[in-house]
Amino acid sequence: MDINKLIERVKAILLTPKTEWPVIATESTTVTDLYKNYIVILAAIPAVFGFIKGSLIGIDLPMLGTMRVGVGAGLMGMVISYALGLVQVYVIALIVDTLAPTFGGRKNLLQALKLAAYAFTAAWVAGLAQIVPWIGALLALAGGIYSIYLLYLGLPALMQCPPDKAVGYTVVTVIVAIVLSFLIAFVVGSITGGTAPGRVSSSDIEYDKNSPIGKLDDWTKKMEQASKQVEAAQESGDASAQTEAVGQMLGAALGSGKVEALAPDQLKPFIPDSLADMPRTDISVERNGAMGMQISEARATFADDGGRSLQLEITDTGSAKGLMALAGFASLEEDKQTQDGFSKTYKEAGRLVHEQWDNGGRGEYSVVVAERFTVKVAGAAKEFDELKDALNEVNLAGLEALKDAGVQED
């Protein structure tokens, strides 16, 4: 195995995919070489770092503290997750190969395996971010989304499907991949606790902008523009320009472009001096960023002399606000009732709302404002409505008025 060659391939497929896919299409290789020199190495990243996060660092649970999976169970989960991940790549290649004629492509299992392996690169590399709190989860998600874009770009080159068929081809493949991912997560969790090719160009095809495929088409166009900026920055040799361009690409992957999150002095005024008749006892406000992406967060505790306390969190998701919009578009809903309490997720007045209550007298109430800001109140209360009343003391209208603050035009 040539580690330098592997690194160069990873960089090329991530930063200049449009020029790298035609190169990959002409390369001579075998299934064994693909696995030995590429797949078995990169597929280990999410499995290993998932073990580090779950068993060594721990997962923070609201109101419950930090949860860690036992090292033995974590290691077993890591091994099984890794093994199933290796199988998943080949299964997706089989599906891509089977679907090829449906979308005007040519069946070729080896080309399909190359496509699956190199498209997975972004998701595998992003597995490194699992150990980074908060923004790491977003970067890992962005990696998965970027892998979808890599798949979309690679289909015409490797499976020889018409470009105007690539969106539908991608959608069907991704749906199958999602189902497989859920199955893998279920298995690991149980252990650890078409038509013939046409002559119409893609520019002649229009989609309903409000439909899922229309939104995907719009997203791919934004990603294409962002990738051009990355290629230009790469050719310039300017390190700062490259970082900026990659940040813009991540913003496009997250569906919102580049957004400068609110500065701490802009977010702090939304934390009141008192909440539910309890004075504020501490406060922290910070803005963090990586690769051109930013997120701001304000936290405060309110307590009285009787030992009662509430925690308030206000987060500006910045460049990840596209995910909030996606959550709203998906119309996420949940209504779960048990003898111990309830958990609900629904939309109210255009806002995504989450309620959680333990009959022992603790719960949380959170609202997504303007598809960008999340506001959450958690703690002890006599009844759930006390948490709702407390959150309504926050100036939500003021936050909503800042929904376009820091948003940079495409």
Image (cartoon, rainbow, N blue to C red):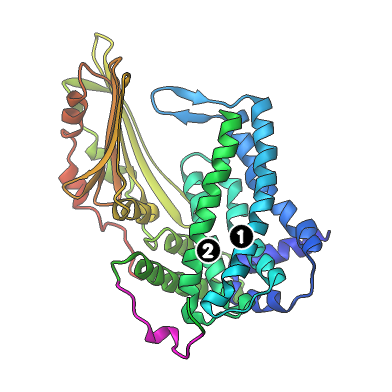
Using the numbered discs, state the Cα–Cα distance from disc 1 to disc 2 in whole angstroms.
Answer: 8 Å
51 within the magenta span: no
Proximity of marks 1 and 2: CB atoms separated by less than 8 Å? yes
Q: Name the residue rendered at 33%, 32% in the picture.
A: 299
Place of residue 99 in the rendered image (x, y in percent of width and height, measured from the top left)? 56, 70
207 within the magenta span: yes
Secondary element at image label 1: helix
Q: Which residues are magenta?
A: 197-208
Residue 291 in sight: no
Q: Quadrant of residue 187?
A: top right
Which of these two is toward me, 57 or 329?
A: 329
Q: Residue furthest bottom?
A: 199
Place of residue 171 in the rendered image (x, y in percent of width and height, measured from the top left)? 46, 65
Place of residue 308 in the rendered image (x, y in percent of width and height, measured from the top left)? 26, 14
For the stretch drawn in magenta, the main secondary structure is loop
Q: Residue furthest right?
A: 1
Q: As shown in the figure, which amino acid type bears the numbered disc 1?
A: Ile
* Residue 393 left/right relative to 262: left
Secondary element at image label 2: helix
Q: Could you tell me which quadrant the C terminus lies in?
A: bottom left
Residue 255 in sight: yes
Task: Give the tally of numbered discs.
Answer: 2
The residue under label 1 is 92
The residue under label 2 is 173
Q: Name the residue rendered at 21%, 21% in the picture.
A: 279
Q: Could you tell me which quadrant the N terminus lies in?
A: bottom right
- Specify which label sits upstream in the sequence, 1 or 2: 1
351 shown above or below 362: below
